[in-house]
């Protein structure tokens, strides 16, 4: 006759973790199988049967959930006092085997407010260490923490839970338990889990460290052949003696450095003796660093010798913004002086007269005959201001 | 004389057609002739210059050979001569040569003081070639 998985496992006095490890099935899946939430597929049936050393036919494909036992008073927790506090360990047992009950009603707890016990049974505890998913101030373990009462989302005393809801994994109150169905909205303990609302005190986390992560299990069902993590860590190879690299010596000066130095020394009119005084050694003996330093020194000396350019002096050819800036000023003065202007046109023709007016493109002259003539600048090759005869005579008188 | 100045000169000789007239007659893109004539740097493609040379009835080399003698290059030479206080010799398109020290120069003309002390204003568009004396 086929039996429920949890019955067979208990007969073999195995914990879920042990069975999971042996069969290579995830513990959560085994829990789901035992609660009857999922039927066991053939593949897992074979594995579980092999692990339990029974025939496949002896396992019910869909187990009935384990019965709920009467609640038991919570045993005094060794967590209080000097005993070491438990840590949540997924590899630990939640069921102790003989005498222990898988679900003990109000007594057994997966995670309780009065000391973390997964399953009380005959005193066996889900975890013997101190829970550390949160911080427990009063020595009461929990998946979260709130004044020592385990509760991920809650903070009310005595109400443990993974979140909202009441009973959780171990099921404290009839009809409210849910072995594997609990989730973030369900209680994970046996007592009504507090509601996570703003009116209640928020769960206390360690502000510095945050909620502690449960330790990573060493056993990986997906890679059962892998040894423990610590065992897998490769040892750091020892450094070989004499493996340290020596700092390379400074390389000799580059040919380009020497060539540049020669040019600079030539510009500075320095001889070989001057170089010896400056560098302390001949060029051929310089290393790269010394050559670089000497180059810098020579360039500074050369800069000091060069006369400074006047500040503000344009470095490129001067291009006035105004096209005819200077010519405009010049012609204005010529017009005011009424000096005779002598034009030579592109074909050699000459014109003479006094300037009557001008524009950027043309000049207007009053010739000696009284005529006015406008000449395009394009036709002009050059022009000169020649002194009038009266002015020439005055100049001659001044000279004599 | 730069290409642009030479084109201005040719345009004057031809009776002063407008740039638009020239562009219409030669097929040069609109605005291109104005750019060639007014820009300081070398402008115009060989095809455009060849079209313009045909329009003005001059050899194409007459325009292309002037690309190196730009107005900007003349500005640089005038400034250099003024800084060195050296006379500069300007060979004009009209065949004359004027030599003197630069007193001022702008984009339209340059004032040279000749050896005899007389001053002459040379129109830059007439300058064909130049050379700084003593350089």
Image (cartoon, rainbow, N blue to C red):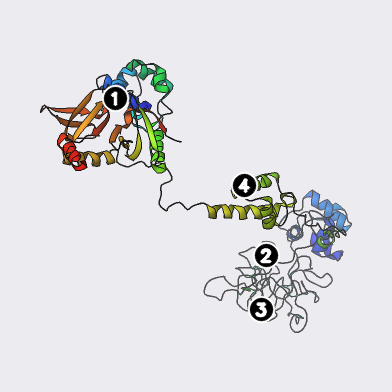
Mark 1 highlights which residue?
B19
Within 10 angstroms of label 3, few (less than 14), some, or many (20 or more) residues? many
Kindly check if marks 2 and 1 are in contact, taking CB atoms under 8 A apart as contact: no
Mark 2 highlights which residue?
A178
In x, y percent, where is residue A56?
Answer: 85, 52
Q: Is residue A285 above or below residue B72?
A: below
Judged from this view, the residue extending furthest toward the right is A53
Mark 4 highlights which residue?
A266
Q: Is residue B111 above or below residue A96?
A: above
Q: Which mark is residue A148?
A: 3
Between A354 and A102, the one lying in front of the other is: A354
Sequence-wise, the earlier of marks 2 and 3 is 3
The residue positioned 26% from the left and 38% from the top of the image is A327
The chain containing the residue under callout 4 comes to A
Sequence-wise, the earlier of marks 4 and 3 is 3
CA distance separating discs 2 and 3:
23 Å
Mark 4 or 3: the one toward you? 4
Within 10 angstroms of label 1, few (less than 14), some, or many (20 or more) residues? some
The chain containing the residue under callout 3 comes to A
Q: Is residue A269 left or right of residue B35?
A: right
The residue positioned 67% from the left and 57% from the top of the image is A278
Between A108 and A340, the one lying in front of the other is: A340
Q: Which mark is residue B119?
A: none
In x, y percent, where is residue A201?
Answer: 56, 76
Sequence-wise, the earlier of marks 2 and 4 is 2
In x, y percent, where is residue A389?
Answer: 16, 34
Mark 1 or 4: the one toward you? 4
Q: Secondary structure at mark 3?
A: loop
Quadrant assignment, res A52: bottom right
Kindly check if marks 2 and 3 are in contact, taking CB atoms under 8 A apart as contact: no
């Amino acid at each position: 006759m086929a039996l429920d998985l949890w019955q067979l496992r208990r007969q073999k006095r195995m914990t879920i973790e042990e069975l999971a490890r042996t069969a290579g099935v995830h513990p959560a899946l085994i829990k789901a199988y035992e609660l009857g939430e999922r039927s066991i597929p053939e593949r897992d049936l074979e594995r579980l049967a092999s692990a339990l050393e029974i025939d496949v036919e002896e396992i019910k494909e869909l187990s009935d959930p384990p019965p709920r036992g009467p609640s038991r008073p919570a045993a005094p927790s060794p967590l209080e006092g000097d005993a070491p506090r438990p840590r949540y360990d997924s590899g630990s047992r939640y069921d102790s085997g003989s005498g222990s009950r898988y679900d003990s009603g109000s007594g057994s707890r997966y995670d309780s407010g009065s000391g973390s016990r997964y399953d009380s049974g005959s005193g066996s505890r889900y975890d013997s260490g101190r829970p550390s998913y949160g911080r427990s101030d009063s020595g009461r373990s929990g998946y979260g923490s709130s004044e020592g009462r385990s509760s991920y989302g809650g903070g009310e005393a005595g109400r443990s839970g993974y979140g909202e809801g009441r009973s959780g994994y171990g099921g404290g109150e009839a009809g409210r338990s849910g072995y594997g169905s609990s989730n973030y909205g369900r209680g994970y303990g046996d007592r009504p889990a507090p509601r996570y609302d703003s009116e209640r005190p928020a769960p206390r986390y360690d502000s510095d460290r945050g909620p502690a992560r449960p330790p990573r299990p060493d056993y990986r069902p997906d890679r059962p052949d892998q040894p423990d993590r610590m065992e897998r860590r490769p040892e750091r190879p020892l450094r070989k003696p004499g493996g340290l690299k020596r700092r390379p010596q400074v390389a000799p000066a580059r040919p380009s450095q020497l060539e540049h130095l020669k040019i600079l020394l030539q510009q500075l009119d320095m001889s070989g003796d001057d170089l010896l005084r400056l560098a302390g050694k001949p060029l051929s003996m310089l290393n790269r660093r010394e050559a670089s330093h000497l180059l810098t020194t020579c360039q500074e000396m050369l800069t000091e010798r060069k006369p400074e350019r006047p500040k503000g002096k344009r470095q490129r050819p001067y291009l006035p913004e105004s096209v005819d800036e200077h010519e405009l000023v010049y012609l204005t003065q010529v017009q005011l002086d009424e000096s005779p202007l002598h034009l030579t046109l592109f074909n050699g023709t000459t014109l003479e007269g006094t300037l009557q007016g001008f524009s950027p493109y043309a000049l207007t002259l009053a010739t000696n005959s009284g005529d006015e003539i406008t000449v395009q600048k394009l036709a002009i090759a050059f022009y000169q201001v020649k002194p009038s005869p009266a002015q020439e005579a005055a100049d001659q008188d001044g000279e004599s | 004389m730069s290409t642009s100045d030479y084109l201005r000169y040719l345009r004057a000789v031809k009776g002063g057609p407008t740039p638009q007239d020239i562009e219409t007659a030669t097929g040069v893109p609109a605005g291109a002739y104005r750019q060639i004539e007014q820009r300081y740097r070398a402008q115009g493609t060989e095809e455009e210059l060849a079209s313009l040379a045909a329009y003005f009835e001059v050899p194409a080399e007459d325009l292309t050979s002037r690309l190196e003698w730009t107005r900007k290059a003349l500005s640089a030479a005038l400034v250099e001569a003024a800084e060195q206080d050296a006379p500069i010799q300007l060979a004009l398109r009209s065949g004359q040569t004027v030599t003197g020290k630069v007193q001022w120069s702008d984009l339209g003309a340059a004032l040279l003081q000749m050896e005899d002390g007389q001053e002459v204003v040379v129109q830059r568009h007439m300058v064909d070639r130049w050379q700084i004396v003593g350089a």
